[in-house]
Image (spheres, helix red, strand yellow):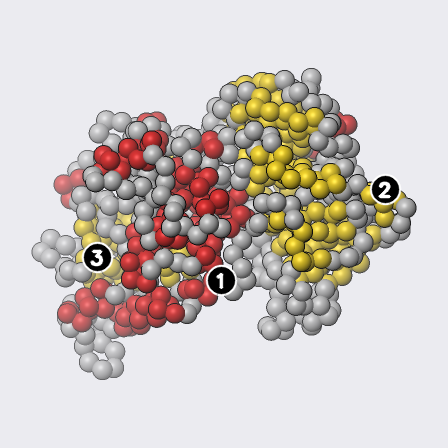
Amino acid sequence: MKPLETGDPIRLGPYHLRGVLGEGGMGKVYVGQDGQGRAAAVKVLHSHLAHDRNLAQRFVREARMAQAVTGEGVARVLDTRTEGGRPWIATEFLVGPDLEEAVRAYGPLDESGVRVLAVALARALQDIHAAGLVHRDLKPANIVLTSAGPRIIDFGIARPEHGFTLTVTGQVPVTPGYGAPEQALGRRVGPAADVFSLGAVLVYAASGQRAYEGAHVAAVQYEVVHGEPRLDRVPPVLRPLIAPCLAKDPAHRPVPEQLAGAFDPPRGADRVWRQGPLAQDVSARERSLHELTTTVPGRGAGAAAVTGGPVTRRRLLTALAVGGAVAAAGGGAVWWSGRESGGGPFDIPPAVPTPKLRALSTERGDYVNGQTPKPLWTVASAVGTNTPAPLPVRDVIVAGAKGGGLVARSVVDGSEKWRAPDVTAGSRYAALSGRLVAAADRKGVLRTFVASTGEPKWTAEAEVASVLAADDDAVYVVTGDGRVRAVGRSDAKVRWTAEAGISLTAESGARGATAPGRLIVVGGGGVAAFATGDGRRAWVRRGQSTGRPGLAVSGDTVVVSGNRLAALDAGDGKERWAVDTFGKVRGVPVSSGPPTLHGTHVYAAVTGFPRRLAIADGKPTDWTYEGLVQCDPPSPLLVQGHGFWSVAVNAKAGGINVLDLDLEREPWVFPLIKNVDRYWITADGGRVFLLDGASLTALPVF
């Protein structure tokens, strides 16, 4: 840390500058303090670069774009302005060592710590990508370990473009060993590049060594593009979770949402940030920051010192030295927006934050152990009678509207937020990165709407009969003649159309999901996979399932239900394991219910009862629950909070059973279901949503 020098500003906006945190080729980073005593990292563009009008405008524009990222896992942008001809950005001042410092000082994280880190970073990347941005420089030095958990820092600083348009070429400097192969080759990059960087970060966190090493920068970059990552010191149980992130082809990498579910840390694993040497380090830094923000440094500060006498400049800078980790300007990430400027159908606003609900706790007196709390809200005639399964998308839950069309209701209170009357809800719908909802109208036109507001955006003439799924690049649909089609999200143009190889009629109950580089489609009599890049049919398995099969994907594993529950390799379709699930309950034939994948387990109704199986080999765990599940149709099963949710019914009525996964709490029973032939449960953000006939109910979790 350095004191302010001649020529350094004393104040920028509401921030008094106290010292220099760092300096790079693009500018300086100061520690600032506002009128309420709150600290911030204030990044200022160098004066000789501020004369470049385009660069200065870009600096502020990208900072304002980064303000759209409001998740808990990032250092938020607090303000950005231009003052005296020099633009500046203020971000949160995070207290704690960065991951690189922590691993050097205390060694690699244990398995639980790596799992917690992976989930936190994956969720942060979800928020970043939902805002239409790509970090581009995720590395251990840009991850601060705070008492509240990991936070991603160092974004919003522009770089010289040397005549290239960043959003077209993607040609940006990368940190050797952490930048993706497409970055090292100077190609355009997208969200998948951040997933590669996350994989490299997790290798370092788990092993203390880099995934790619070499004698010089060029050698490291060669290994990134052509070599294999060094995973020998990564715990064996973590290797299959991390390795897919480091795929050379961006299309073969998992998306952050899949990673957040796959790593599944055990309960209490987040204590790594609250105990031990790392926690003591963070606490010491927090005390130093408290001294800094409650003590005014000497003359010219405009306020008196706290009791105990004035603080010297040396003491201030000593406090700053252990006060927090903030990277220097110009040494960090470049942010890219997938949005076009100037408005229009492809000018998509960021996804709004999910209004997460705190899990109920007996310790806080939220409910009495052994008693079931009341629902959060119920809307009696919320949806139409022919609606597909409701779809939670951030702050709304989308379903077919009563009287036709699409309706989006607030997840907080069930109130109607918007309606799209021209959409055919029966064609199903999909969420696009939490920002858009895609559905089809009666003429087969694919239409998109801003998820939070319902504002119409781009459309595509695609002859859509049913919407299957979406990934970062495309929306996948079934056409009226039963073919599979991909529609690009960036231009609304048809990318490819392929013969399905299986029946995808309305009666087949076709479902779709994406895996790295694959679109998986299940329909009448089989399962098919297509390469997402060109639509080439990668494999078909006929006779895999019958009736209305269920489908779930985690990483490169596809789980399909029907008369049997089977796990397939997404790449080649080979069967990894299968369980015969057809049987009878009280004389009534039943098949397996739709699968749910959570962490390393598959949850599904098997011969009428909930089961938890290992994703890796299909073996049952020692966790069982003999509560009767709906016979026909089978019940969905959910994991939300610390609870497992299943539905039990008889011929006249039914309810939802909620069981603690650790079998420590008394179960909850919501005796709610009146329409035993038409119900569904889904969940998001600490709420479980029940569709019961035309009514929609939100339930709390523990």
Residue at the extreme left of the image, as rendered? 6
Q: From the viewer's perspective, tell me whether residue 285 is left or right of residue 419.
A: left
Q: Residue at x 85, y 42 (%)?
A: 589
Residue labelled with disc 1: 269
In this view of the protein, which residue sits in the foreground, 575 or 283? 575
Q: Residue at x 41, y 39 (%)?
A: 246
- Judged by depth in the image, the label closer to the viewer, 1 or 3, is 1
Q: Vertical placement of 687 versus 522: above or below?
A: below
Q: Earlier in the sequence, mark 1 or mark 3?
A: 3
Q: Quadrant of the N terminus?
A: bottom left
| CA–CA distance in space, label 2 to label 3 | 69 Å
Q: Amino acid at mark 3?
A: Leu
The answer, for residue 167, to whether it is visible in the render is no
- Which secondary structure, mark 2? strand
Occupied quadrant, residue 376: bottom right
In this view of the protein, which residue sits in the foreground, 217 or 500? 217
Q: Residue at x 14, y 41 (%)?
A: 48
Indicate which disc residue 21 carries. 3
Q: Vertical placement of 575 versus 124: above or below?
A: above
Residue labelled with disc 2: 589
- Which secondary structure, mark 1? helix
The answer, for residue 502, to whether it is visible in the render is yes
